[in-house]
């Protein structure tokens, strides 16, 4: 095992991590501020990817595609929030699960109806196509490096938004005490719509960025959604910092697990068996991580202890 | 308004009449549809115990359905290929006997529910939903990573497993088996709901402090309910494998978990026969809407959304206007 | 003097900067009603939580029948014989009145893991539950949905559920609230007789009732017990007058 191979895997894990952060940041805010479980968050990711692929395909501009993804997901977020989600805040979790599950069915079938069953492809923008070579000779794909940079930049911007701006103060106040914020005259409905749209736009951005690495297809958001849930459980509901730490942790565990576990078992087993056992175990690694966190801290690493 | 008891008899009667009519009219697909409805209903009866009585919104019940299905598929695979499942420390052979397969399916899914429940019941609310979903997904990926049992392609059961004295290859006897098991599960869930255990479980859903104050630990109640719930859903999984003569990771997918919840809610959460009504309705919609449009899921989603937003209480609730006599 | 049934020894609990209980020592002796009063925010709810086991103390211990139960939670203390009623009703609202009483009987019997026998058809459980409803005067309401009861009736049902536990001590959090004058008088009469079965630690806002039936009264102020004694002692105590009426009163 060479050092540069390991370094590459670590960067891949980091890239998966920041992408997962884009997904889970919005989810955890919606959980924390509105107390709502939104299964349809993966659909917003998918909408972002489809909008990017369609617009980039038509115009040839990746940046326009990215803008379209942000806009489409945010608009979809505002629509969904005002038409459906708003009626669910006061409902129990079962109703929230069902209604947002219904939204998934509608979005998935609707997208299939619009775009057909065949996957779309989104090209990596030309300047980022090649690898970037670091001093020392280590080379890494430029596009993935760009995703890591964008993800970290968004994370910093979010921290700044929550910690330093008036909107951030309201969001934090909303997490602590919903009635109080409303009583103080903050337009709570608009705050909720804004938070939801922000989360949606971030999910759409994640979908568009990943769309260039994988094929763009119906259902692409759901595995990511479940990973985002795992992240929120590990990080603690409502905590942006928790979501960030847990995202990186999950990204690294998953990527390095798939890379290292078969190698590790290879030291004590024959290669084919080691590959099977290692792969099976690696596919479960992040869930085992989640179980371990649950045993030690049922409210997550950064959740409020009870 | 109709009384719930009469409606229940009507529902069970209709589920029996449909395949008999299909047999008489030589329309075997009717029998298959009814069998599918009965099996999905059985799975939902299991879920209803946790969801309706215990208030545990499990978004991972497909995992138990899949474990039951794989129990059937794996045992049948080994019996059909005459290879032992394991040779050390003891030799275990496959089997094509349904009662044996059911036993294994029930035990295996109960164990899975015990493990998942013991961890996820340490939390509640949104956490519980996300964690059951995550553990379900874990088993899904585990099944995908099992090359010995087909990985993503799953396992085929070439000949439907056998039940002593019945020709299970014919649709009607197989339906009868599923119908009887559904009836037994309904009986079991009714007995549980009126037992001291059921009373305490239901009270724990409504007021946890109340139950603790009379010296009852809610965690234990919920764990037992979750295990029984998972075991019934696992039994349904074994039957589902035999119906399709095929098991794949799709049986563990979280979409199916969501659909189980939909079945329970369409019929009416916590109603004894809610799952049966929900499953019947679901299979009906799937069949007829599926014939009308390839994109029938949009209509299902829209209908579900309307039910949740405007018609809580499900179909039985609507027909009996909330009276539970 | 007989040994106390419930003993709180030096219980303290902080919430952030607030000391909600400061070295509280208090006992409940056989056959007595010991009332706990104090202005709003004095720490009564905290003390109830610490006694019932739903809150953990930072320091101090709780004894039940001479046994240290500090480490037991609410479930454990209920099993050891502490019968608690809630201020804000904790009843299972969708169940019937009888079913709520049955729940207590089930807890008392320890037969909660019986899965296949009907709870309503069990003679022993039903007798226990009905007897409790009879005693608080709710037997006519047995088959009504609990959510349909008035607030006062819910308080009575809380007491009935505690009765089914046949506890060695009662811990009652404002059972009179919402009862009205007539109901309050009847419940006072009932508690007056009940103390012979098991002593009652009574937290109550209804001062007429407290001064009428309490054998001893403790006054809680800013997390501290500032006085304990008979009704007469408490009326005369200058610290109590200050706590309730302000400095001019002394």
Image: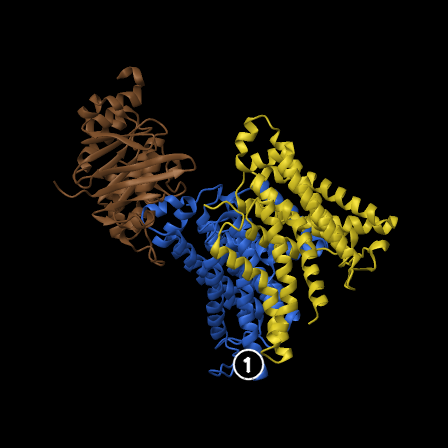
Whether residue B140 sits left or right of residue B10 in the image: it is right
Most distant residue in the left direction: C1
Residue positioned 47% across, 82% down in the render: B89
What residue does disc 1 label?
B79
Residue positioned 60% across, 42% down in the render: A30
Q: Residues within 10 Å of mark 1 (few under 14, many from 20)?
A: some
**Chain C rendered in what hue?**
brown
Most distant residue in the top direction: C248
Q: Where's residue B235, x and y in %?
A: 50, 66
Q: Helix, strand or loop at disc 1?
A: helix
**Chain A rendered in what hue?**
yellow
Whether residue B255 sits left or right of residue B204 in the image: it is right
Q: Which chain is blue?
A: B
Quarter assignment of residue B136: bottom right
Q: How is the image coloured?
A: by chain
Q: Where's residue B243, x and y in %?
A: 58, 68
């Amino acid at each position: 095992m060479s050092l540069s191979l390991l370094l590459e895997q670590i960067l891949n894990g980091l890239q998966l991590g920041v992408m997962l952060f884009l997904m889970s940041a919005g989810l955890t805010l919606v959980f924390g501020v509105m107390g709502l479980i939104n299964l349809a968050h993966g659909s917003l990711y998918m909408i972002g990817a489809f909008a990017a692929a369609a617009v980039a395909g038509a115009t040839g501009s990746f940046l326009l595609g990215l803008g379209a993804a942000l806009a489409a997901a945010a608009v979809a977020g505002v629509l969904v929030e005002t038409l459906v989600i708003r009626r669910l805040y006061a409902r129990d979790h079962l109703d929230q699960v069902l209604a947002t599950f219904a939204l998934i069915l509608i979005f998935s079938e609707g997208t299939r109806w619009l775009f057909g069953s065949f996957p779309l492809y989104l090209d990596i923008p030309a300047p980022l196509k090649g690898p970037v070579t670091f001093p020392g000779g280590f080379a890494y794909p430029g596009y993935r490096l760009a995703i890591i940079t964008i993800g970290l930049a968004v994370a910093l911007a979010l921290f700044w938004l929550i910690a330093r701006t008036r909107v951030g103060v309201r969001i934090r106040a909303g997490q602590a005490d919903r009635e109080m914020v409303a009583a103080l005259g903050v337009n709570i409905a608009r705050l909720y719509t804004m938070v939801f749209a922000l989360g949606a736009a971030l999910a759409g951005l994640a979908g568009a960025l990943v769309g260039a690495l994988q094929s763009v297809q119906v259902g692409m958001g759901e595995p990511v959604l479940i990973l985002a849930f795992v992240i929120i459980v590990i990080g603690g509901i409502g905590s942006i910092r928790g979501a960030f730490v847990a995202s990186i942790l999950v990204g690294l565990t998953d990527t390095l697990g798939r890379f290292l576990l078969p190698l590790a078992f290879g030291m004590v087993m024959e290669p084919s068996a080691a590959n099977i056992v290692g792969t099976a175990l690696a596919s479960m690694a992040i869930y085992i991580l989640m179980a371990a966190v649950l045993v030690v801290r049922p409210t997550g690493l950064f959740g409020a202890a009870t | 308004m109709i009384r719930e008891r009469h409606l229940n008899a009507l529902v069970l009667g209709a589920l029996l009449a449909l395949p008999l009519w299909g047999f008489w009219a030589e329309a075997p697909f009717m029998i298959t549809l009814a069998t599918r409805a009965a099996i999905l209903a059985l799975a939902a009866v299991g879920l209803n115990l946790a969801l309706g009585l215990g208030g545990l919104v499990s978004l991972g019940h497909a995992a138990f359905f899949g474990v039951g299905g794989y129990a059937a598929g794996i045992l049948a695979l080994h019996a059909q290929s005459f290879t032992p499942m394991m040779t050390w420390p003891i030799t275990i052979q496959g089997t094509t006997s349904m009662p044996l397969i059911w036993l294994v399916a029930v035990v295996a899914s109960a164990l899975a529910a015990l493990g998942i429940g013991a961890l996820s019941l340490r939390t509640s609310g949104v956490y519980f939903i996300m964690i059951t979903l995550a553990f379900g997904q874990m088993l899904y990926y585990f099944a995908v990573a099992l090359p010995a049992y087909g990985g993503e392609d799953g396992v085929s059961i070439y000949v439907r497993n056998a039940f002593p004295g019945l020709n299970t290859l014919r649709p009607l006897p197989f339906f009868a088996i599923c119908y009887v098991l559904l009836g037994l599960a309904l009986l079991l869930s009714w007995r549980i709901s009126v037992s001291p255990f059921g009373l305490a479980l239901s009270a724990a859903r409504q007021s946890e402090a109340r139950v603790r104050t009379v010296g009852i630990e809610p965690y234990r109640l919920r764990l037992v309910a979750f295990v029984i719930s998972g075991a019934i859903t696992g039994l349904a999984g074994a039957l589902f494998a035999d119906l399709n003569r095929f098991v794949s990771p799709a049986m563990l997918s979280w979409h199916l978990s969501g659909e189980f919840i939909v079945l329970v809610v369409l019929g009416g959460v916590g109603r004894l026969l809610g799952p049966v009504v929900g499953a019947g309705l679901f299979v009906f919609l799937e069949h007829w809407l599926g014939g009308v449009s390839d994109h029938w899921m949009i209509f299902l989603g829209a209908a579900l959304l309307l039910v949740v937003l405007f018609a809580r209480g499900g179909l039985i609730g609507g027909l009996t206007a909330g009276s539970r006599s | 003097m007989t040994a106390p049934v419930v003993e709180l020894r030096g219980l303290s609990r902080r919430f952030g900067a607030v000391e909600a209980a400061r070295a509280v020592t208090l006992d409940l002796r056989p056959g007595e009603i010991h009332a706990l009063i104090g202005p709003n925010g004095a720490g009564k709810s905290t003390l109830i939580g610490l006694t019932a086991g739903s809150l953990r103390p930072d320091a101090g211990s709780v004894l039940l029948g001479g046994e240290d139960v500090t480490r037991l939670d609410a479930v454990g203390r209920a099993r050891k014989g502490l019968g608690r009623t809630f201020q804000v009703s904790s009843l299972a609202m969708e169940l019937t009145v009888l079913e709520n009483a049955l729940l207590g009987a089930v807890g008392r019997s320890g037969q909660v893991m019986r899965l296949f026998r009907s709870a309503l058809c069990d003679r022993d459980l039903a007798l226990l539950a009905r007897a409790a409803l009879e005693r608080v005067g709710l037997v006519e309401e047995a088959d009504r949905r609990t959510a349909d009861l008035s607030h006062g009736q819910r308080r009575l049902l809380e007491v009935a559920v505690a009765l089914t536990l046949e506890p060695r001590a009662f811990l009652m959090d404002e059972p009179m609230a919402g009862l009205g004058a007539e109901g309050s008088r009847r419940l006072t009469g009932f508690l007056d007789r009940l103390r012979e079965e098991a002593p009652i630690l009574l937290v109550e806002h209804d001062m007429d009732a407290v001064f009428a039936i309490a054998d001893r009264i403790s006054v809680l102020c800013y997390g501290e017990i500032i006085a304990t004694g008979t009704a007469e002692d408490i009326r005369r105590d200058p610290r109590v007058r200050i706590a309730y009426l302000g400095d001019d009163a002394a």
